[in-house]
Image (cartoon, helix red, strand yellow):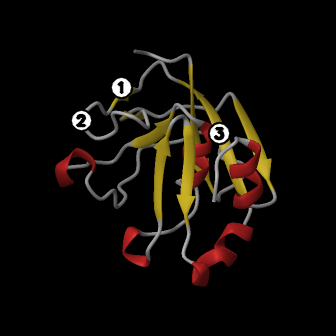
Amino acid sequence: MKLKYLYHGSITSEIRELEPRKRYTPGVLKGRAKPAIYAAADPAYAVAHGFPWGSSEGFDVYEYNGVVTLVVPKKHKKRLNQPVFIYKISGKYFKLLVNDSPKTQIYISYRKVKPTEVISFSSVAKAIKYYKGEN
């Protein structure tokens, strides 16, 4: 299902055009991920992926009954204080990663895309709360 808009989170402000990048995405595309833009149907999920963290540090993100939960170990809670930016982008050139994200609806594109809107938050924690997620 194509969505009109998707969301991409980042700690980088003023991105005029998102371009495919190679990044560590454990489990996605069975380790064969090439440079891409990842976006989410749920802006809370985009927030959760918009700042640096790793599963090996004890972080996790999941969706249950429509609520996105970001699990942050106590020793890393300060990371939730950094600003985050949510980029609203057209879903036109994105495809759903069906096997890798059946519930969370993660989409991928290999084409550059210009954001239609950017929403800035003073902290990751405030952004998660704004989008009705939990941390």
Residue 80 drawn at (x, y percent): 68, 67
Residue 19 drawn at (x, y percent): 47, 43
Look at 28% across and 49% down and name the residue there. Answer: 28
- The secondary structure type at the circle numbered 2 is loop
In this picture, is 105 found above or below 11?
Answer: above
Q: Which residue is mark 2?
A: 99
| Left-right relation of 55 to 69 | left
The CA span between labels 3 and 2 is 25 Å
Q: Earlier in the sequence, mark 3 or mark 2?
A: 3
Residue type of the residue flagged with mark 3: Tyr
Q: Quadrant location of residue 79? A: bottom right
Q: Are marks 3 and 1 in contact (CB under 8 Å)?
A: no
| Left-right relation of 63 to 132 | left
Q: Quadrant location of residue 8? A: top right
Q: Which residue is mark 1?
A: 95
- The secondary structure type at the circle numbered 3 is strand
Q: Which residue is mark 3?
A: 87
| Left-right relation of 20 to 9 | left
Q: Along the line of sight, which residue is nearer the eye, 94 or 100?
A: 100
Look at 52% across and 54% down and name the residue there. Answer: 49
Q: Which mark is residue 41?
A: none
